[in-house]
Image (spheres, rainbow, N blue to C red):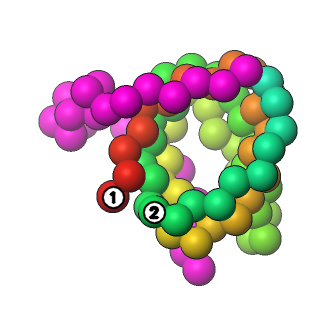
């Protein structure tokens, strides 16, 4: 299985890819299990979370562009209220 991909993205790329027009998801600090049946691309608008997987723990924060692969089972730990643009591929 592929790992979570995390990379910074420029404001120019946000506009080019139309990310600012994607739906927004937000969540208060909490913990929950999640399974990805589709590949998700997202841009973290604000907040901080740890994502625990079989491959290790990944931290995501404001400004990160994140790709969650199909088939990923994980546990989300939202440490600071998170808001993200998201799109399923």
Residue 65 is left or right of residue 14, and the answer is right
Most foreground residue, 46 or 10: 46
Q: Dot 2, crowdedness within 10 Å: few (<14), some or many (≥20)?
A: some
Query: Compared to 42, does 5 lie above or below?
Result: below
Does the image show residue 69? no
Please give the residue where the numbered disc 1 appears in the rendered image. 89
Tell me which residue sits at (21%, 34%) in the image.
18
Query: Compared to 17, does 36 lie above or below?
Result: below
Q: Check if residue 14 falls in the magenta segment.
A: yes
In the picture as drawn, the residue positioned furthest to the bottom comes out as 1
Most foreground residue, 58 or 68: 68
**Mark pair 2, 1: CA separation:** 7 Å
The answer to whether the residues at label 2 and label 1 have Cβ atoms under 8 Å apart is yes
The C terminus is located in which quarter?
bottom left
The boundaries of the magenta stretch are 1-28
Q: Check if residue 86 falls in the magenta segment.
A: no
- Which of the 4 image quadrants contains residue 9? top left
Q: Position of residue 82 (x, y in %)?
A: 63, 24
- Which of the 4 image quadrants contains residue 36? bottom right
Please give the residue where the numbered disc 2 appears in the rendered image. 38
Tell me which residue sits at (29%, 25%) in the image.
20
Residue 14 is left or right of residue 16, and the answer is right
The N terminus is located in which quarter?
bottom right
Q: Position of residue 41 (x, y in %)?
A: 42, 49
Residue 73 is left or right of residue 12, and the answer is right
Q: Dot 1, crowdedness within 10 Å: few (<14), some or many (≥20)?
A: few
């Amino acid at each position: 299985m592929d790992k979570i991909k995390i990379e910074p993205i420029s404001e120019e790329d946000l506009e080019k890819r139309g990310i600012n027009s994607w739906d927004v998801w937000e969540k208060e600090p909490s913990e929950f299990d999640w399974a990805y049946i589709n590949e998700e691309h997202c841009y973290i608008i604000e907040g901080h979370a740890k994502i625990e997987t079989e491959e290790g723990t990944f931290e995501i924060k404001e400004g990160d562009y994140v790709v969650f692969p199909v088939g990923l089972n994980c546990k989300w730990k939202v440490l600071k209220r998170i808001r993200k643009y998201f799109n399923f591929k």
